[in-house]
Amino acid sequence: MSDGSAEKTKDETGAPPTFSEIGLEGFAPYLFNRISERWNTTIREALKGSELTTVRMRALATLSARPGLTINELSVLAVCEQSTMSRNLDALEEAGYVRRVPKSDDLRARELYITPEGQRALDAFWPAMHAHHEALLSGLEEREREQLLALLNKVLRTIRQNPY
Amino acid sequence: MSDGSAEKTKDETGAPPTFSEIGLEGFAPYLFNRISERWNTTIREALKGSELTTVRMRALATLSARPGLTINELSVLAVCEQSTMSRNLDALEEAGYVRRVPKSDDLRARELYITPEGQRALDAFWPAMHAHHEALLSGLEEREREQLLALLNKVLRTIRQNPY
């Protein structure tokens, strides 16, 4: 098991290390994908029997934290293709969970808001999601959680600045 | 922008914080999903025009780091459904990139190995993948990369121990 020190960027000759030299545990994208996949599977299973799906829950959660987003912004933040988000927003609006308000400075654009009914649906799922979140991070001490969040936010800021 | 301190687990009354109190930047699964999605999109685009797909590249990379896996193990480590992996292994075997060897202690089970041809196909893509990996982590100093890898491996070990 790597402690991270396998993450060499160059060997003595200046050549980049091979993938097998880095190893799975030294390759951050592998770790991101394993952890994301497990989280998403957990949430999908936890949502079974509820009225929400992963996309709809993400839309409500994102709008509860960031009211007034456009559909473009919401799609990025909820990690969902815009066409898929659009269909799900129609359903959420029909259920009375989301409302669209014309932007004051551009009447063709719409701002999205969670309604009190939408907030109640999200609140009903939140204790389960919070418990899964605690379980996911249960191996970390409080100080390590803060370190992890700070590092992940740094990586996300890098991604945002670069065109990929 | 959170520096991680928003990751409260309990407020003064002992109630868990709401999602909007934690906020997107304080919610690790959001960050994992954003980063994974961006990485996977980057790699999918980088593989365009090559002979490999994401699943096949992941299979070869995983087998180069961990020779002798079974298909079950490979599917978990490559974060791919087993039925999808099975179809892709057939294609990789046909291309001469992977070979299946009966296990000495259980002739019904097969161990998977990357062939020299498979290693060459992986090596041809590796400089591009390595450059994208460097770009992903370019906002972190060497010490921070090591911290991140150590923390991600801790989270992954927690996931492995828990049935979710």
Image (tube, coloured by chain):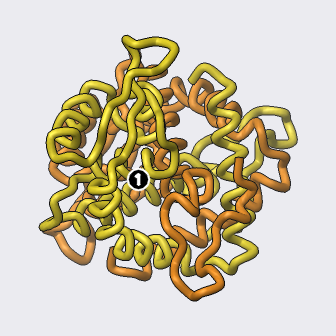
Chain colours: A yellow, B orange
The spot of residue A23 in percent (x, y) is 59, 54
The residue tagged 1 is: A61
Above-or-below relation of A80 to B26: above
Choose between A148 and A70: the one closer to the eye.
Answer: A70
The spot of residue B45 in percent (x, y) is 44, 20
Above-or-below relation of A68 to B10: above
Outermost residue, bottom direction?
B14
Choose between B38 and B107: the one closer to the eye.
Answer: B38
The answer, for residue B121, to whether it is visible in the render is no
Above-or-below relation of B14 to A102: below
Choose between B19 and B120: the one closer to the eye.
Answer: B19
Query: Mark 1: which amino acid?
Result: Ala
The answer, for residue B107, to whether it is visible in the render is yes
> Residue drawn at (35%, 58%), measured in percent from left and top?
A119
The image quadrant where one finds the C terminus of chain B is bottom left
> Residue drawn at (57%, 62%), measured in percent from left and top?
B21
Q: Is residue B162 left or right of residue B145?
A: left
Above-or-below relation of A36 to A63: below
Kindly identify which chain the residue marked by label 1 belongs to.
A
